[in-house]
Amino acid sequence: MSRETIVNIVLALLLLAIPLGASAMGEQFYVTLATRIAILALAATGLNIALGLGGLVSFGHAAFFGLGGYAAGILATHAFNAEPLFFGLPGTTSMPVIWLVAIMVCGLVALPIGAISLRTTGVYFIMITLAFAQMIYYFAISWPAYGGEDGLSIYVRNAFPGVNTAQPLPYFLICYVVLMAALGLFWLLRGSRFGAALQAARQNATRLSAVGIAPFNIRLVAFAISAMVTGLAGALFADLNRFVSPSMLSWHMSGELIVLIILGGKGGLFGPVAGAMLYVLFEFALGGITERWQFFLGLILLGVVLFARGGLLGLLAGKARHG
Amino acid sequence: MAEPVLEIRDLKKTFGALKATDGVSLDLMPGEIHALIGPNGAGKSTLIHQLSGSFRPDSGTITFLGQDIAGLDMAARARLGLGRSFQISSLAQEFSALRNVMLAVQARQGTSFRFFRPVMSDKSLTEPAMAMLKRVGLAERAHVPAAELSHGERRQLEIAIALALGPKAFLFDEPMAGMGPEGSKALTKFLDGLRQQAPILLVEHDMDAVFALADRISVLVYGRVIATGTVDDIRNDPEVRRAYLGEAA
Ligand SMILES: Nc1ncnc2c1ncn2[C@@H]1O[C@H](COP(=O)(O)OP(=O)(O)O)[C@@H](O)[C@H]1O
Ligand SMILES: [Mg+2]
């Protein structure tokens, strides 16, 4: 077993053991903290497909995180008020249905955004993805039907068949299983033909073209898959907080997702998990001591970028080599 | 007479005031190695780039197997069967030599939108890729990342990738550059056998290789073809001797 595999297993068990232990001791707060980690890791795993594998630095993934959140909020609100949504379709409080809607909406929105953004590269790509996310952000703010600036409350956490989602631990377990499934998907993608083409597009797009594979098509599909995973995380996040607001769509959120990946280790399977753990622990530990915890986070980020390119995962597991 | 595989007519390309390609017409016939020689800066690489689709010509036509390909991008031309190597190696640096070739194999199979099956245990990719590495003599280095290969090995890898595409024509831009006498000799022998598989448009500075290999030679100077002919024609052409060959002939 490689060192990276061992580190991955340890991280996966740690993320599971902490809330189990905390719940047993009646410390529900830590369960919620772990749920937050799992959901942020899921969102970052989505981004890691585009950024880590494809080298596409999307500074607009909050758009998909927020859209997933609003999908949950809007569907739940309509179900709660027993108002049909549109075309007489009812809302729903069923998580699986909400997830499906969130995933499809994000895929559909990501295709045109990707199709336009992917005509550019480098800093222009970063700026265009940011611009699209900002458009959606301002749209949400100025749309009073769903709370506008104030956001939208979900009065009762949505339902999952056979699980009491109102309890912190069962809800954590749902999020944990979804995260593991997404990591499985990421692992499969990375090792697949599609993943090979996507990683080649990052390393050398001309080489990919020269063998007859159009980088644009590969990147577009990757961008859409990436958005769908992040959107799913958004739906879970809305249910965790029982609240969705435009802040989920803000550029801070996009930046946070990028930071998670860089902290944890870009392109690594468990990079987003390591990053989310570090980030949430920091927010919690330093946030209690000083308002300026983000400053210290910035320092650490600087250290990672300068001295540990592989992120936390790279430090723990050494540099990964494939094939 | 057989139809040319690749037919270039009156191709023009300028960079600002510089006429890098100035009305070039060339044919690549089935089974031939057509060498393109000329001094540095003559526009050889620029021509290859226009054929492979990296650069768009200002005017002129490029016909490949009877089809006008001027409007196609690089990937589409590669899919039609134009296999190229780059003067400056262009590889997926983090991937091993094997994975670089596997990418070409999967491209040829047209199967890049498969999302789940792991490539490294997929014999339909690894076996043909390994066979290509063997053919160019790079099999022992199959698992070394491209970034860690020597200069000469990277050139070999470029050729293996082009081979794996099973192209209908090869465009090689100075494949021997920096290879050393041993490597050049081996590659010369290898290219000699390759012409049966598909014709080669060969840009090369190594005159020994060119004279040993070429069925025809075209001489490019300042973006213009000043002569096309057999090895003997070119050796004895006074204008070529003056413009280019001089002491090399
Ligand atoms: N992308 C470019 N932009 C501007 N000038 C270029 C470019 N590529 C090549 N050139 C110029 O075009 C001329 C031909 O270059 P090139 O085709 O590389 O020559 P060769 O391969 O025969 O040595 C040179 O003068 C070179 O400086
Ligand atoms: Mg050149």
Image (tube, coloured by chain):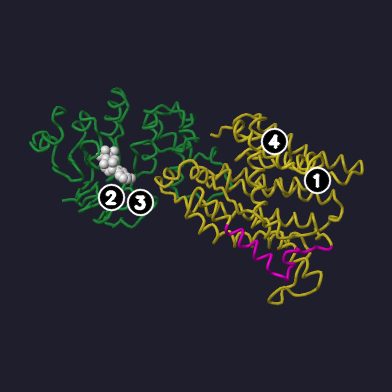
Which stretch appears magenta?
A131-155
In the image, which is nearer the foreground, mark 1 or mark 4? 1
Q: Which residue is mark 2?
A: B16
Q: Is residue B157 left or right of residue B67?
A: right
Chain to which mark 2 belongs: B
Do labels 3 and 1 touch, CB within 8 Å? no
In the picture as drawn, the residue positioned furthest to the bottom comes out as A88
Instruction: Give me the C-alpha separation between circle 4 and circle 3.
Output: 42 Å
Q: Which chain is green?
A: B
Instruction: Give me the C-alpha separation between circle 2 and circle 4.
Output: 55 Å
Q: Which residue is mark 1?
A: A33
Instruction: Give me the C-alpha separation between circle 1 and circle 4.
Output: 20 Å
**Dominant secondary structure (helix, strand or loop) of the stretch shown in magenta:** helix
Residue B77's disc number: 3
Chain to which mark 4 belongs: A
Q: Label 4 amino acid?
A: Asn
Q: Does B101 appear above or below A90? A: above
Q: Is residue B221 left or right of residue B101?
A: left
Same chain for the residues under marks 2 and 1 in the image = no
Q: Position of residue B92 (x, y in %)?
A: 46, 38
- Queried whether the magenta region covers residue A137, the answer comes back as yes
Looking at the picture, tell me which residue is in the foreground, A96 or B110: A96
Q: Which residue is mark 4?
A: A8
Res B243 quadrant in image: top left
